[in-house]
Amino acid sequence: MSQTALTKQQKKEFAEILYCNFQLDQKVVAVKVGVSPTTMNKWANDPRLNWEKKRKRLLIGREQQLTSFYDQLDALNKFISSRGEGKNFPNSKEADAQNKLTGSIRDLELELSIADKIGAIMDFIKWIQKTSTTEKAIELTTLGDAFIRSLVK
């Protein structure tokens, strides 16, 4: 289906994905989706749609989750250690929590997920937006879209 065949609602949904998930500039999204910059600006700033909030929420990624897991593990270990000599070992529930946290940390550190790949593409496209032309950003966004679609097949 070509972009010109998209309904207004489909264009809006596509714009939301590009703007919120890919963190593209409004100007790039407007061209990519086939709407005016004014329409794109209205959608992006509509408080009922909450695109800015969605955009910020998606910035929380693997690094923030890893930090949270490490903080939780550290707090648990300090709590266990605070019991004093001879009592500073975990009970079964605490040991289970330690194992789950360390497993989650290991998985996050070792796994290059689709989200990580999307994040790398997003970073690259943001860099292109700052250092190159809008046309180049649109071209590379199209290629990035195709690459991501190939990952989820």
Image (spheres, grey):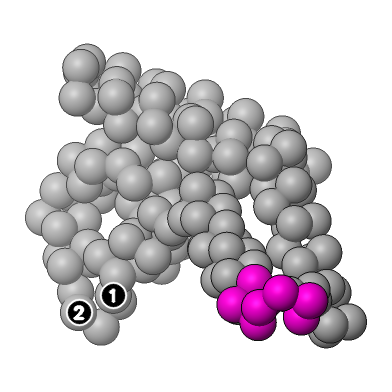
Q: Give residue 15's mark.
A: none
Question: Which stretch appears magenta?
Answer: 80-87
Q: Secondary structure at mark 2?
A: loop
- The answer to whether residue 49 is seen in the rendering is yes
The answer to whether marks 1 and 2 mark residues whose Cβ atoms lie closer than 8 Å is yes
Count the marks.
Answer: 2
Majority secondary structure of the magenta segment?
loop
* x, y percent for residue 40: 21, 56
Q: CA distance from mark 1 to mark 2?
A: 5 Å
Q: Residue at x 58, y 70 (%)?
A: 78
| Residue 55 to residue 87: above or below | above
Quick check: 58 left or right of 51?
right
- Kindly indicate the quadrant of the structure image that contains residue 51: bottom left
Q: Magenta includes 83?
A: yes
* x, y percent for residue 75: 55, 71
Quick check: 17 left or right of 31?
right
| Residue 66 to residue 81: above or below | above
Residue annotated with mark 2: 47
Please tell me how crowded label 1 is: few (under 14), some (14-19), or many (20+) other residues with Cα within 10 Å: few
Q: Give residue 50's mark.
A: 1
Q: Residue at x 40, y 25 (%)?
A: 124
Q: Secondary structure at mark 1?
A: loop
* x, y percent for residue 10: 46, 61
Which is nearer the eye, 81 or 135? 81
Q: Which quadrant holds the N terminus?
A: top right
Q: Please, what is the three-letter code of the amino acid marked with disc 2?
A: Pro
Quick check: 72 left or right of 49?
right
| Residue 54 to residue 26: above or below | below
Q: Please, what is the three-letter code of the amino acid marked with disc 1?
A: Asn
Q: Residue furthest right?
A: 92
